[in-house]
Amino acid sequence: MSAERNPDPFHYENVTDAINKLPVVEDGLAGIIPESSSECMTDRVQVDMEQGFVQVLPITGRGGNPTPNLRNKRDTVDLKLPVYEVTDTLHERELLVPTRETGSIAMRTAETYRNQIITPMAQSITLTRGFQRAKGWLEGRIYDNDGAVWMDVFKRLGETQIVNEWDLTDSKFSLGDTIVEQKEEIEDELGSYSAERYVIVSGRNANRRLRKNKQAKEAMTDAGRFFIQQKDARKGIPILEDVDIVGYGRTNYKKPDGTLERFVDDDYAYMVPIGQGLARAVAGPSDMKQFRGQILDMYASIRELDHGKGEEMLVQACFLHFFARPRAVVKIRVIGDDE
């Protein structure tokens, strides 16, 4: 940005600064699954097609030839970073801030009015980020707002997601044993990555069914394994030493046709390994020349409407969420006696 700042509160530099400092309400999944964030100066990021195994080195004789790193033989795919934009129009009469004050008081009044306009725009971007985070991390797909798949990471990598069923109505079903087996299946997919712990992110119906399971109830009432004061079990049940069941069913979004859909399907759960470098969040550049060479959470631009009738404000963001090993996130249909 320029060295000398334009004092106009509606100048693009000031709007960009303000919108990136606004307090916004996150969707919640970022607090459940810690992200590994990075920046990308282009509109796409390259991802290694790493398989679910590690490289074991052979013994090298003294003076012998070393083994090349498998990285030298790696295959990569490009994942494109989507751009999201929202606009609002300020008519000329709105730009004439109704105040009798001058100087710093008038400036603060204008800034307050500006923030009232950009706050819902920033919140829309933030919730869109949460929507992409949920779908990108849990399902390996980037969806548009109408439900169409914009990019399928599994297809790009030549893989498919592991989908299992947990039938809680089966008298032989053991939640603890099943989770251990699921961990082993995930470990096979992690390759060189390692999981410190696991979370089972469950939709509204799936979480209710899991909470009713006998072993889950025991975990909730065992003071040695669970806080007895915990009133809302949706916030997390430590079902095993390193596995928590977490409910996530509060966020809806409206499609253009008016139908509502949750960020996480009501009847499904996702067992997610938590570890360094797994849940990726990539921030990308703007395609506006005034932000060339900069990576920001959000970008803002202002342009004058025809015939001096006001100004149009645009807020833009570019980001991508994906899992480093998508097959390590297992999708689970949870069957209960309420179906």
Image: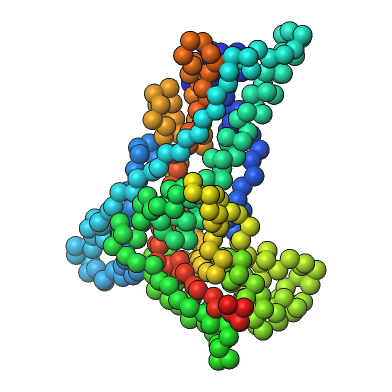
Task: Residue 100: name its quadrant.
Answer: top right
Give coordinates of residue 215: x percent, y percent.
65, 83
Let me know if residue 208 appears in the view. Answer: yes
Farthest residue in the front direction? 257
Write the residue at 56% across / 40% down: 124
Give coordinates of residue 336: x percent, y percent.
59, 79
Task: Residue 234: name its quadrant.
Answer: bottom right
Give coordinates of residue 325: x percent, y percent.
40, 62
Image side of residue 164 versus residue 45, left or right: right
Write the residue at 64% across / 44% down: 25
Write the residue at 58% across / 21% down: 90
Image side of residue 333 versus residue 219, left or right: left
Q: With respect to residue 84, does 113 lie above or below?
A: above
Image side of residue 287 versus residue 254, left or right: left
Let me know if residue 130 appears in the view. Answer: no
Quadrant location, the C terminus = bottom right
Farthest residue in the bottom direction? 172
